[in-house]
Amino acid sequence: MMNGIQQTVTHSLDMNEQTLRDYFTKTPDLIYCHLFIGEPKRRALLIYFNTLVDKNSINNNIIDPLLFETRQIHTIADIQLPIGSKSYTTKWEHVIQRVFQGETALFLDGDDHVLLLDTQGWPQRAIAEPQIESSLKGSHQGFIETCEKNIALIRRYLPHQQLKIEETTVGRRGHTPISILYLEDVAHPEVVQELKDRIEQIDVDTIINTGELMQHIEDNPFSPFPQFLLTERPDAAVSNLLQGRIVIVVDRSPSVMIGPMTFITFFQTVDDYSTRWMIASFLRLLRLLAFFMAIFLPSTYIAALSFHYEIIPLNLLLTVGESRERVPLPPLLEAILMELAIEMLREAGLRLPAPIGQTVGIVGGVVIGQAAVEAGIVSNIMVVIVSLTAIASFIIPNPDMSESIRLLRFPMMVAASLFGLVGMVIGFMLIIGHLISLESLGTPAGSPFAPARLRDWKDTLLRFPLWMMRTRPLSARPTQLRRQKKFRK
Amino acid sequence: MKRYQFNEITTMQYIFLISGTQVGIGILSLPTQLADLANTDGWISIIIGWIISIIASTIIIKTMEKHEQDTIFDLSRRYFGRIFGAFIHIAFVAYASLASTTVIFTAIHIIQVWVLPNTPNYLIMMLFMLPGFLITRNGARVLGRYAEFVFYLTLWMPVLIAVPLQKGTILHMLPMLKEGWAPIIQSVKTTVLSFLGFELAFVFYPFLKEKKHAVKAMVIANSISAFTFLLITITCFIFFSPDEIPSLIWPTLSLLKTIEFSFIERFEVIFLSFYLFVMSTTGIPYIFTTVFGISQLIGKKDHTIILLVVVCIFIFTSFLYTPPFSHIQMMGSWWERYGLWGAYFFPIGLFIYTSIARWFQGGKKK
């Protein structure tokens, strides 16, 4: 850490200041504040980063009491300040690390201990409703970029001593603080250990966002499917904690990472549990249908038109033929053209400010949709199919999963144009074959279908009444299976 | 010591793996074969075949129980020594490769006849080899999960096959035993062979997690297959007239041809495409057995490279050779002849031999 200089703090204040000034060059925001404290006066030095601290706290809680200190100060331990979180150290490494995190270091002449005071305060956003995963009935608080606040949001739901938090840092330059949260009596220790081992092995400059951490530790980087859930919702995080999963909170990032996940968990939302079970089950089935539509609808169109037009009933076939009459493109090109257009529209709308985004929507919807048909570039049916596919992919609650599904339909379209239905079935087989061998933190992602566990099916395609779901899903390998007693008949 | 601890399969996966292997291509032509021999009494021989196959699979399990961690490849070496053991080993691998070749080429043929008449067979072979490679590579555990998943995925198929039942004439089934027991007994040989697939218990038994349910699992697996065979055969017999059936090559598919919906036509095309799932659960376990057996023979732990070689051989073969239907039928009859020995006579012989061998060894434990 400190190259070429001594490792520990010395008794001499002047030497310490010199060490600091040698180490921190070209740091105009590092403040050296010289003070004389106590009776008789002793020299003291306060250092902190102007940009990372709460100035009110420093003025009122540190400088003010120190100036009016009338007792005699023998050692640094005699200094009493109205700040709860404080620690002592003699190591430069700690001093520097803490000061970089927004703490204030107090040096006293003649003492080799340094008092570190928690004065963190940096620009942060207020807690707001999560933008991507909005919910009808769930809480309207979302995670923000500060780890402490995020843990606070989770703790509010789970005031229980079994909620354990382990802290570590990732990145040699960034020292991104990472907190691993789990319920000790539910989460499987092997899974927790596996996760910790993987995080420990990361050797990078820094982690800017949770998504980066996810890619560093996921089981199969060559899979199109996400293997960890990223969420901005505290209630989703808590719901998963209670199922025996592990939540990883990354400082500076508004989304937390949850693992181990199974495939079906990406189709569940917190709203499912607060809606009545019939409606929730209907929504689950709707999402499953959307999953198949988003992957297979364009390819079914291609397969039916290029290989198996005999499966289309005559009346429909005539309509399709009529609408394709003027279209010069083969079905595959037609479909890929429209699908790419809608992907571009989506991406354009995402990056633009909201008012311009609306313009993109109108241009895309009206001009491309209507005019392309009138110009005879694509058929009416194709526009319907592309729109349906797009809507279906929006229904998938998890953005990561939705994106992988959007990606998968392109190879499926190519397979359908080469081999028709057979190609699609083989594609489906490949997806299944991949999904059942996929693992998340060493637990099978295909659970509870393959390997099957019928009891866990209660919370998959349908959502059974809450009082019937008495056990936690086995997919996360919980050590405590029972979550509620049979209290209702 | 557990040799396959990280590759264990549950009892349910084991059941679906075995019954998935049994229900495959045979079912598409079974009603015709039965009608040829025993007329509409063929369903009785299915039941007899079911009982025989249960007995045979119980014998297999009883043999395997003596050394729980051994596949047939280890067992043959243990009891027959290096040279003769290797001979049995190679014979079993050859059997599995013959079975997988038959399944794959039949599947390609059916797909070419019914769905993709203009696609060359090497392209279809390449296409089939993709999931074949992906699933076989990961070993028995993924194979088990795949069989399980496919079972759920294909549950709607028997329901659909039963739809034509309501249009059929139950009188076709009568009179029962119209030609006496002789033709029924004769056709038992056919039905017994349609249960082929349970002999893979020789390979998959050591992977089973709870060995005490093994016999029960075999009975359930055979029963699922028997139920499927019965359902399809009886539906065919009721729906088609007894004189019509022998003229159909793929009676099951002809049955589907009659299903009509207002929103979709030519349903058998869709059904057959999905039927690839069922055929894959027949072919892939045999491919696995072949590859696993070869890698055991040359003492390799990882079978990926050999799998790659086998896949390449399959694709290369399909470039040079497009089997006509008569060849496919010939392959099928070879498989059946070989299977009769491999799945019925060999286990009985093995069981007697191992029992005697152990008796001679006395209480000596290996």
Image: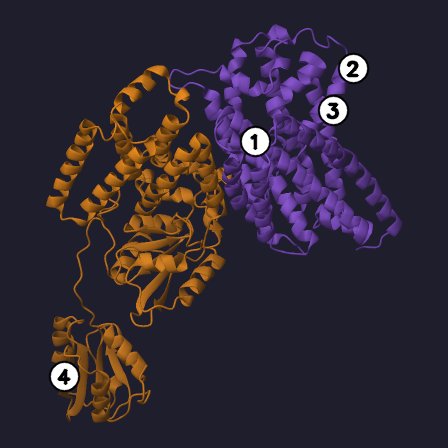
A225 relative to A10, above or below: above
Q: Residue at x 61, y 31 (%)?
A: B323
Residue A281 in the image: above or below residue A314: below
Verify CB contact (< 8 Å) between mark 4 and mark 3: no
For mark 2, what is the residue? Answer: B182
Q: How far from the left and from the top, in percent, is residue A276?
A: 32, 33
Tell me what hue chain A is rendered in: orange
Dot 2 amino acid type: Ala
Residue extending farthest front: B320
The subunit carrying tag 1 is: B
Res A5 label: none
Q: Do the residues labelled 2 and 1 touch (CB within 8 Å)?
A: no
Whether label 3 touches label 2, CB < 8 Å:
no
Q: Which residue has dot 1 on it?
A: B107
Characterize the local packing of mark 2: few (<14), some (14-19) or many (20 or more) Cα atoms within 10 angstroms: few
Q: Name the residue under label 3.
A: B189
Q: Is mark 3 on a helix, strand or loop?
A: helix
Q: Nearer the viewer, mark 2 or mark 1?
A: 1
Question: Could you tell me which chain the residue with mark 4 belongs to?
Answer: A
Amino acid type shown at disc 3: Lys
The reply to whether label 4 and label 3 mark residues of one chain is no
Q: Which amino acid does label 1 sit on?
A: Ala
